[in-house]
Amino acid sequence: MIYINQSGYLTDGTKRAVILDPADKFDVLDSNGKSVFSGSVNYFGFDECSGDEVYTADFSEFAEEGSFTLRTDGGNVSESFTIGSDVYDKLFDDISKAFYYLRCGCGLDEKHAGVYKHGKCHHTKAVLWEDNSVEIEASGGWHDAGDYGRYVTAGATALAHLLYGYVLFPKAFEKQNLNIPESGNGVPDMLSECRYELEWLLKMQRADGGVYHKLTTKGHAAFVMPDDDKGQLYALPVSSMATADFAAVCALAYRVYQKFDSTFAGKLLEAAERAEKWLEANPEFLFDNPKECTTGGYGEWNDEDNRFWAYAELFATTGNKTYHDKMKSALKKNFPITHLGYASVGGLGALAYMTCGRAECENPLVEKFRKAYADEAEMLAALTQESGYGAAMSEKHYFWGSNMNLMKHGMIFAIATACCQKDYTAYAQKQLDVLMGINALGISYVTGNGYYRCNYPHLRPSSADGIEECIPGMVIGGPNKNPVEPTARQFISDGTPPMKSYVDREEFYSLNEITIYWNSPAVFTTAFLLK
């Protein structure tokens, strides 16, 4: 068995395959079966997270474009793969356009959605959970995951990943044509897609600056199409985390959109500062997810890192000393400063400070954040080296949404490369390799991409649309050593290694759900590799 990156390999990038059978030599064969490159197979040894004896083949030095296979002297031959400068273009476009397919409050037309079209959904007014007599208009945004809920903290985190991807690697996005309704309007398509979510976030803010935590029905819908979900929508109570994350991402978005639409950018900054005023007036942690509402809670233990992120982004945008002082005060709390959300967002605040370029930034603080990212990257690099498959993952990382961890670790490598004067590109590449097939099951965890790909996610429209091929570009949660569903043990026996604890069945949400904040780090990491 030979596992390859099923999307292919960049011409000048790291190229590797994992082999499960003993071998000493390998050859890269062209489409005519001629050997065009040879190398030695390296024995890695036992890989703990997979339970496999692993051999590797590195052909990074081979930079010829075309279609190839890899053959070992043991007689194994891989599936064909492509080497070229454009091999990730489809993957990048698909994981980016996935957000369009998750749009709420509108219909998806055939011109832009093809066979995945559907009617207008969730466009009725919502009522406040605390007072059902009060209605608000809050249509729009993205369905968060396999369900039809919309959650502020999750949305803000996904937006931050995408917007920082654009800030750091703009060229990757500027050439995209995602075939969305806004394509061709002079704004990069990914930014037009992000604006759709931002417009919804603005509707979730109360007049006093507080932000409702989520907008959902009382419980998850049945597996029906979005336009067939007619349940009453509720705006759940304001939370301090949602308000802080809202303030942060709106301040960040101001910097991004100012050159495209100064009026819209102004609305974002005004909303961010109004949210900050609410935070000032409400210094205590505030969160209430009523037990009668069984949709995603998205709760956290405190809001310290959320407030830090908010103040950091507001300072990065305005240069206001008050925000700078509040940011430094918030930093005194004990939270990680390299975590990238949704439940721990301190790394986004550090990223804001490192990249804003303001003269008012204090150099020791910039260096503190850079060192934190560099140290994290070094730790993850060590994990990568300890993995036969090249995953920056230990056993503890294989929980619900493990591919989120995988891709956020790709983000860490990308950020450390961009900000810390050491090149971790090869390590980021290996994380994408794992996502795209160099893993213990030889499966691509992105729908519509790869020979052997997930196709049955826990995703309501994918189940209800009657189409065999899933909507493309959805990043699947992935292996989970402790699946929530008891029936999953019919397919994953006790003692199964973490990297193999997966089955492609829609009923297992703790293995096979999708979310916007699992797609967004994959977009960021791929943009970095395409930079």
Image: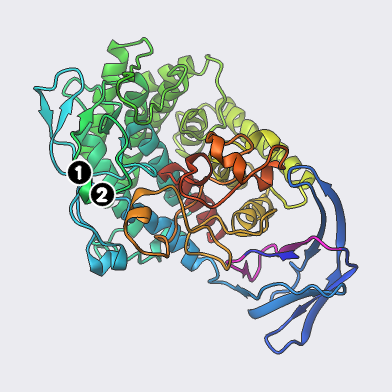
Residue type indicated by callout 1: His
List x then y, in percent, for residue 344. Answer: 50, 28
Query: Does the image show residue 188?
Result: no
Q: Residues within 10 Å of mark 1 (few under 14, many from 20)?
A: many
Secondary structure of the residue carrying numbered label 2: helix
Farthest residue to the right: give it.
Answer: 24
Classify residue 443 by image quadrant: bottom right
Mark 2 near mark 1, Cβ–Cβ under 8 Å?
Answer: yes
Image coordinates for residue 402, horizontal then vertical, percent: 58, 41
Q: State whether residue 74 is above or below residue 172.
A: below
Total numbered badges shown on the rendered structure = 2
- Label 1 element class: loop
Instruction: Say the numbered circle drawn on residue 226.
Output: 2
Residue 123, quarter of the rendered image: top left
Q: Position of residue 238 (x, y in %)?
A: 27, 21
Nearest the viewer among 19 and 137 is 19
Q: How is the image coloured?
A: rainbow
- Asked whether, in this view, residue 3 is left or right of residue 82, the answer is right
Q: CA distance from mark 2 to mark 1?
A: 7 Å
Residue depicted at x 73% and y 63%: 16
Q: Tell me where residue 416 appears, x and y as whole percent.
A: 61, 42
Q: Does the magenta stretch mainly form a helix, a strand or a loop? A: loop
The kind of residue on which mark 2 rests is Pro
Residue at 39% from the left image edge and 31% from the top image edge = 313
Residue 285 location, quadrant = top left
Check the image and report above or below for 488 versus 10.
above
Residue count near mark 2 (Cα–Cα under 10 Å), binned few <14, some 14–19, many ≥20: many
Q: Is residue 276 magenta?
A: no
**Earlier sequence position, callout 2 versus callout 1:** 1
Q: Which residue is mark 1?
A: 122
From which residue to which does the magenta span run?
6-21
